Image (cartoon, rainbow, N blue to C red):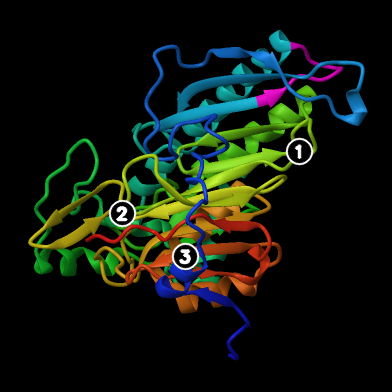
Amino acid sequence: MAKPPRERLLFAALASLLCAGCPDAPPLVEAAAPSARNAPVPSDAGSATATSEPAAVDAAAAHTARVRVTGEGKAMGTHLAFAAYTNDRLDEAGVRRAFDAAIAEMKRVENLMTTWREDAQLAKVNAAAGKGPVAVDAETRHVINVALQTSVMSQGTFDITFESLHGLWKFDQDLDPTPPTAAAIKALLPRVNYKFIKVDDDKGTVFITKAGTKMSLGGIAKGYGVDRAAKVLKEAGLDSFYVQAGGDLYTAGRKPDGSEWSAGIRDPRGEAGSYFGRLLVSDHAFSTAGDYERAYVVGGKRYHHIIDPRTGYPATACRSVTIWAKTALQADAIDDAVFILGPERGIALVETLDDVGAVVVDAKNSVWISNRLKGKLTIDRVPSEGL
């Protein structure tokens, strides 16, 4: 396949382009929310609070001062953050009700697609691996089908059967900075293959053909949840808002002054809350995968949660990947695939997809930018060096 055109900004080239007076990159969505994957869990999850200052008035609502309302919550194992502007249809109280409905929708998706409860449908699919098909609702089958399509286009680098390795690497509450043995990985790796998953939409079932193989939608369901939350907010009448769940973000419309929403891209080796660039994301989703979260360093080597399903080990070609796409579901699936493929092959994949862009910080701290993000990305400084 011929290599598609792309723009690559190397570390040295970036340094020569940056001006000394450039401001620091803003936090994700103009300081309205904490860092994507460093967001604290709020004490009043599910509540929303109105800002005290009215926003600038746009032409469509010249007779009404539009107020910026913010909210936060918790669902799908992560912090949720919202911001929206009131309009002729919704006052501050109406916006807060819409936020609450969006949080409830994300919790519904979480309950529908979890594998943590034994009575959950996907847990039953895993338990029946190698035995027979299990009834699964149409919504969850849709997300599984998107995951399988992503697996095909990414040459298996995105694979929801990575769950078969669960317990080998401990990056969560069970954090243990002891890498598994090569023998342990070798024993379980044959269970990882998306081709073992068979979806029968006519019969409404999902079947894992290989005993011992497990699947999880943890790498894609959060993006779907963000899309569902955005749909709830739009149906409520909001036309200028964002919804953020950890590293996944969706924005709608423009701000009342006509400007686009802007999201900060985390500096992979910088301090928490530091950003090296900003990306315009109005009416698009934004998702970042990085090796700086759920990670540890042992013996001068970084281990992290983005596992290459082909090897069973953490991927090493990138430090972070940010994907810009029309839906959070698509962005959430593609960011891990690009991270594992590496900058050259990952950018090549992105260039083949409609309305998708990428910003990649590779293992050598070089920044790669896909063609569609030209004019949408501002680099404020060079990403920090570090292990």
Mark 3 to mark 2 CA distance (whole Å): 14 Å
Q: Which quadrant is the C terminus positioned in?
A: bottom left
Secondary structure type for disc 3: strand
Q: Which mark is residue 254?
A: 1
Which label is found at residue 269? 2
Q: Element type at marker 1?
A: loop
Choose between 33 and 340: the one closer to the eye. 33
Task: Look at the magenta stretch and give its main secondary structure.
Answer: loop
Residue at 35 percent across and 54 percent down: it is 268
Report whether 69 appears left or right of 272: right
Left or right of residue 59, residue 339 in this image: left
* Image position of 293 (left or right of 353): left
Q: Is residue 299 above or below residue 55?
A: below
> Magenta segment range?
84-91
Task: Give the image location of residue 9, x and y in percent.
Answer: 50, 73
Q: Secondary structure at mark 2?
A: loop
Check disc 3 and give the amino acid type.
Answer: Val
88 magenta-colored? yes
Front-most of 89 and 327? Answer: 89
Which is more N-terminal, label 2 or label 3? 2
Identify residue type, mark 1: Arg
Question: Is residue 205 a member of the stretch shown in magenta?
Answer: no
Question: Which quadrant of the figure contains the N terminus?
Answer: bottom right
* 1 or 3: tag closer to the N-terminus: 1
For the view shown, which residue lies furthest in the top direction? 93
* Number of residues whose C-alpha sits closer than 10 Å to that of mark 1, classed few (under 14), some (14–19) or many (20 or more): some
Q: Amino acid at mark 2?
A: Arg
Q: CA separation, marks 1 and 3?
A: 26 Å
Residue 360's mark? Answer: 3
**Upstream in sequence: badge 2 or badge 1:** 1
> Between residues 205 and 379, which one lies in front from this camera angle?
379
